[in-house]
Amino acid sequence: MRILLFWPKRLHLHEMVLALLNESDLFLSEEAVEQIVDQVKCMQIKYYLQFFYFLGIF
């Protein structure tokens, strides 16, 4: 069984967060943007672990 998952790199997440903030005319410090990126990465890991557990991989 082969599973292909989209796992964006940290730089891509950083760019996406900046783009969303720019579209909303919001400006946050670099530290705040890094915290958002960290939270998104953490949420992704939890999602994939739940997905693998559901499939019986873990």
Image (cartoon, rainbow, N blue to C red):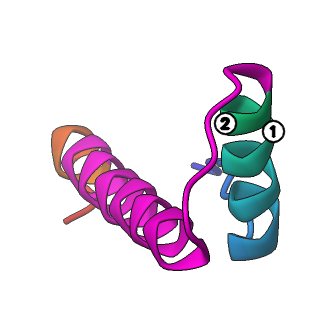
Q: Is residue 13 left or right of residue 55?
A: right
Q: Main secondary structure of the magenta part?
A: helix
Q: Tell me the kind of residue under disc 1.
A: Ala
Q: Where are the magenta residues, as a range?
A: 23-51
The picture places residue 17, in percent across and down from the top left corner, at: 66, 47
Find out whether the residues at labels 2 and 1 contact each other: C-beta distance under 8 Å. Answer: yes
Q: Is residue 42 magenta?
A: yes
Which residue shows up at 78% across the image and 22% down it? 23
Q: Is residue 52 above or below residue 51?
A: below
Q: Is residue 44 magenta?
A: yes
Q: Tell me the kind of residue under disc 2.
A: Leu
The picture places residue 19, in percent across and down from the top left corner, at: 81, 38
Which residue shows up at 65% across the image and 51% down it? 2
Say whether residue 4 is visible. Answer: no
Which residue shows up at 71% across the image and 26% down it? 25
Residue nearest the viewer, comparing 50 with 13: 13
Q: Is residue 43 above or below residue 51?
A: below
In this figure, which residue is indicated by the disc labeled 2?
21
Residue nearest the viewer, comparing 57 with 49: 49
Residue nearest the viewer, comparing 52 with 34: 34
Which residue shows up at 63% across the image and 47% down it? 27
Q: Quadrant of the C terminus?
A: bottom left
| Label disc, if present, on residue 19 of the rendered structure | 1
The picture places residue 30, in percent across and down from the top left corner, at: 60, 75
